[in-house]
Amino acid sequence: MCALFHARGHIDPDDDPTIGLKSGKAKASRESGGWVPWTEEDMAKYRARWPLGTEARLMFDILHYTHLRLGDAARFGAAHLQRTLKTMMVKVATEKSKGRTTATVPVHRDFAVSLAAARNADIVGT
């Protein structure tokens, strides 16, 4: 992430507070190369390979549009959707907090389309 900020001129490399830090997991550390964030092109390729109405696409969209942790995203279902006055919301009691913290995220219109396609394909219930 900081490399992106460097490239866009948002942070001076000499002021980068992450220099020299390790994440605790060798694979994720800067020194080992870490996980590379997906570009818009990477996401477009994935969407082209896995169209709306497939399980792979639904999971991608859950992660992309809600930013839930993997364990919370895996539990996601129709029960986690709630309508407020005008907006559909995702509401999930997070696994890591043992249900004591609730993440609430508005449903993006593209995510709503993905959810509808998944319902039509009988991947998620209503």
Image: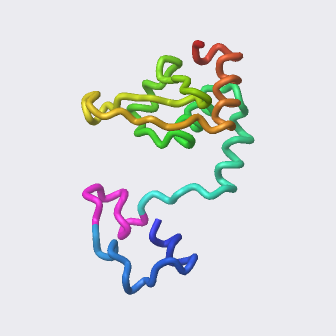
Front residue of 41/93: it is 93
Q: Is residue 121 above or below residue 23?
A: above
* The furthest residue to the bottom: 14
Front residue of 102/45: it is 102
Left or right placement of residue 90 versus residue 54 in this view: left
Q: Position of residue 84 (x, y in %)?
A: 54, 26
Residue at 69% x, 35% y: name it: 50
| Image-quadrant location for residue 121 | top right
Residue at 43% x, 24% y: name it: 75
Q: Position of residue 90 (x, y in %)?
A: 50, 30
Q: Is residue 65 above or below residue 26?
A: above
* The furthest residue to the front: 85
Q: Is residue 27 found inside the magenta-colored segment of the image? A: yes
| Image-quadrant location for residue 39 | bottom right
Left or right placement of residue 8 versus residue 13 in this view: right
Q: How is the image coloured?
A: rainbow
Q: Which residues are magenta?
A: 22-33
Image quadrant holding the C terminus, namely top right
Q: Is residue 19 above or below residue 123?
A: below
Left or right placement of residue 22 versus residue 56 in this view: left
Q: Is residue 1 found inside the magenta-colored segment of the image? A: no
Q: Position of residue 108 (x, y in %)?
A: 62, 38
Left or right placement of residue 20 versus residue 115 in this view: left
Residue at 48% x, 43% y: name it: 67
